[in-house]
Amino acid sequence: MPPDDRDVAAMVGALFTLLANVDRARRERKAATNLALLQVIASGGPIRPSDIAARQHVHQSLATRQIRELEDAGHVAVAADPKDGRSYLVTLTPAGVDELERLTKIGLHRFAMFVDDWETEQVRDLARLLEKLQASMTALSAREQALSASERRAARRSMPDRRLKES
């Protein structure tokens, strides 16, 4: 039996609050910003600033400024993009890899403190459920992308009205 509207609303509220707190920490804490940026660069290989900005959901000028700061710190290297002379590619330097590892350890330690009074199984359950949620979101997105625009509109119109029911 699928969850009822109140359960879904409670889950969404908790997720949005958590995501807002993570986003605020990323904006307010330089280390969190650097960690997120280094992770994007590490996962993308040589990557353009425009792609970094898109993955970070920030304006390209902000990504460019952050890249420049990481370059000044010796954490990234920039080189001309051979496919586009107007752009450049960003890669991690060995010092950047070290900084990524250092900041990752700090972040993991912080999250360990958040769940310090949890049972191991609770942490594993949360990880499993978050992975399941991500897989469900990815699968739905893939199904929706496979539909034409008119099919997506028709599907939305035929969705049941899931307003919260009064108890």
Image (cartoon, rainbow, N blue to C red):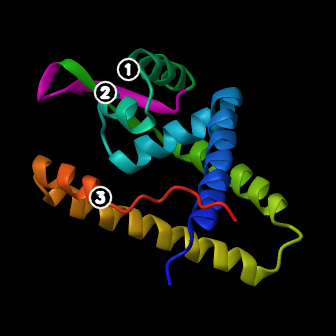
Q: Is residue 130 left or right of residue 50?
A: right
User: Which residue is at 10% across, 52% downward?
Assistant: 148
Q: Is residue 60 left or right of residue 97?
A: left
Task: Tell me the tag on residue 60.
Answer: 1
> Which residue is tagged 2?
50
Q: Are marks 3 and 1 in contact (CB under 8 Å)?
A: no
Quarter of the rendering containing residue 23: top right
Label 2, secondary structure: give it.
helix
Q: Quadrant of residue 155?
A: bottom left
**At label 2, which amino acid type do we have?**
Ser
Mark toward the start of the polypeptide (2 vs 3): 2
Label 3, on which residue?
A: 141
Query: Residue 154 or 105: which is nearer the viewer?
Result: 154
Q: Is residue 16 above or below residue 33?
A: below
User: Picture coordinates of residue 42 (x, y %)?
Assistant: 43, 47
Dot 1 amino acid type: Gln
| Residue at image point 47% right, 59% down | 162
Earlier-in-chain disc, 1 versus 2 = 2
Residue at x-position 58% and y-position 57%:
164
Q: Looking at the image, do the residues carrying marks 1 and 2 touch, with CB atoms under 8 Å apart? A: yes
Of the numbered discs 3 and 1, the one sitting upstream in the chain is 1
